[in-house]
Image (spheres, rainbow, N blue to C red):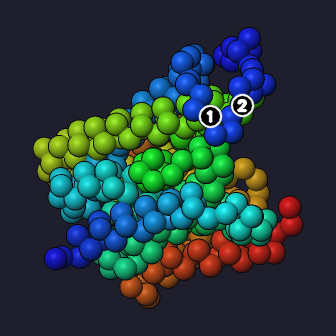
């Protein structure tokens, strides 16, 4: 997949110069666009889930435009849709958004942007833009930047487009249970967590979190059982050796 | 302003703040391996908890219904390495069919 011929070991002086990137590596473009489209398509699931949880079309669209972080968006509609308070929904969504901050930490020295550009870069700092950027590491800094921006903007456009499509679809459907949306939402979460369960340790944490949250549900107010499992993650991460 | 709007705006503001903070903090902070490890584990715990709560509880009660069958099918689809789209749709179809019969 990679075009190995184009692999300049930083031939131009990067420091303080505006190097015009005239040719973006084709492999980078292809990868960015395919990731953007595939991931953007899941916006349909979010749009439908958000409507099923009782959010309006405007609120659903604003979540995709402004929050723009899949797991956090699913979390706020999931928690509040199940009767949780705004605070517990926001807390769950924000705990899931911390990793975007860590991606920003990783991307900032590569992008080197300030002012409005930094604001835009921050908004499109998500799993996919960072992932594609890091995937271009062998191709040099320019390819990493191109991968970040192309994927960031690409996912942004497709994600928002498909969110509206999914929301309109769900509005047309009526009763969410009749169309299986009640199972599609937890299945969507399961699909998000699945690739992260590399080993026995992660699987153990996942199973324990699921059981603890379900066990606590009848006893503490909605949303709190989910946040409580963050403590399990802290405990597991604290004592694990790596 | 109702609770849903508070949720939408609060989530959006904090999501952006977290992203922007990452771009603005010197890299030497927050590179503690323990912090990084916990950060990688938090999504696993929260997402798994959401799967459980949305599959077998309803309004703070344990409820076993068509959703569990749907999610079980999704689990099988994932084990068979099906793409995400197939996973979600198979759960929806299973649940919808059981709901209607």
Local crowd size for mark 2, using a 10 Å CA cut-off: few (<14), some (14–19), many (≥20): few
The answer to whether dots 1 and 2 both sit on one chain is: yes
Looking at the picture, tell me which residue is in the foreground, A219 or A102. Answer: A102
Residue that carries the numbered disc 1 in the rendered image: A17
Instruction: List the single residue furthest toward the right.
Output: A241
Q: Is residue A99 visible?
A: no
Looking at the picture, tell me which residue is in the foreground, A185 or A47. Answer: A47
Q: Is residue A42 visible?
A: yes
Tell which subunit mark 1 falls on.
Answer: A
* Position of A31 relative to A44 (above/below): above
Question: Quadrant of the rendered structure where residue B79 is?
Answer: top right
Percent of width and height locating residue A62 = 26, 55
Percent of width and height locating residue A92 = 46, 71
In the image: residue B89, left or right of residue A83: right
* Position of A113 relative to A225 (above/below): above
* Position of A27 relative to A162 (above/below): above
Tell which subunit mark 2 falls on.
Answer: A
In contact (CB < 8 Å): disc 1 and disc 2: yes
In the image: residue B55, left or right of residue A60: right
* Position of A4 relative to A219 (above/below): above
At x 37%, y 67%, the residue is B13
Which quadrant, please, contains the C terminus of chain A?
bottom right
Q: Secondary structure at mark 2?
A: loop
Question: Quadrant of the rendered structure where residue A160 is?
Answer: top left
At x 57%, y 61%, the residue is B24
Which numbered circle lies on residue A13?
A: 2
Q: Real-space Cα distance between discs 1 and 2?
A: 7 Å
Instruction: List the single residue furthest toward the bottom.
Output: A219
């Amino acid at each position: 997949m990679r075009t190995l011929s184009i692999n300049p070991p930083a031939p131009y002086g990067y420091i303080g110069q505006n190097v015009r990137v005239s040719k973006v590596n084709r492999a980078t473009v292809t990868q960015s666009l395919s990731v953007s489209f595939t991931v953007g398509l899941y916006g349909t699931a979010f749009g439908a889930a958000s409507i099923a949880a009782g959010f309006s079309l405007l609120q659903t669209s604003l979540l995709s435009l402004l929050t723009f972080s899949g797991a956090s968006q699913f979390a706020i509609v999931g928690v509040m849709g199940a009767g949780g308070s705004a605070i517990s929904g926001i807390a769950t969504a924000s705990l899931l958004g911390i990793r975007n901050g860590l991606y920003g930490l990783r991307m900032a020295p590569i992008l080197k942007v300030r002012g409005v550009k930094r604001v835009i870069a921050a908004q499109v700092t998500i799993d996919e833009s960072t992932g594609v950027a890091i995937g271009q590491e062998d191709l040099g800094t320019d390819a990493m930047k191109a991968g970040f921006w192309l994927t960031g903007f690409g996912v942004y456009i497709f994600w928002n487009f498909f969110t509206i499509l999914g929301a309109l679809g769900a509005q047309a459907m009526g009763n969410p249970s009749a169309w299986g949306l009640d199972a599609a939402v937890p299945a969507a979460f399961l699909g998000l967590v699945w690739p992260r369960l590399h080993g026995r340790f992660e699987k153990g944490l996942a199973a324990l979190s699921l059981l603890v949250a379900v066990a606590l549900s009848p006893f503490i107010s909605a949303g709190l059982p989910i946040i409580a499992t963050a403590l399990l993650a802290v405990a597991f991460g604290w004592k694990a050796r790596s | 302003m109702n609770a849903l709007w508070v949720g939408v705006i609060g989530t959006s503001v904090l999501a952006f703040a977290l992203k922007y903070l990452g771009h603005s903090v010197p890299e030497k902070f927050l590179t503690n391996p323990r912090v990084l490890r916990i950060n990688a584990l938090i999504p696993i715990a929260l997402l798994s908890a959401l799967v459980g709560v949305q599959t077998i509880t309803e309004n703070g009660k344990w409820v076993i219904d068509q959703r569990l069958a749907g999610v079980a099918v999704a689990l099988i689809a994932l084990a068979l390495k099906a793409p995400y789209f197939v996973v979600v749709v198979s759960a929806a179809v299973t649940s919808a069919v059981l709901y209607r019969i």
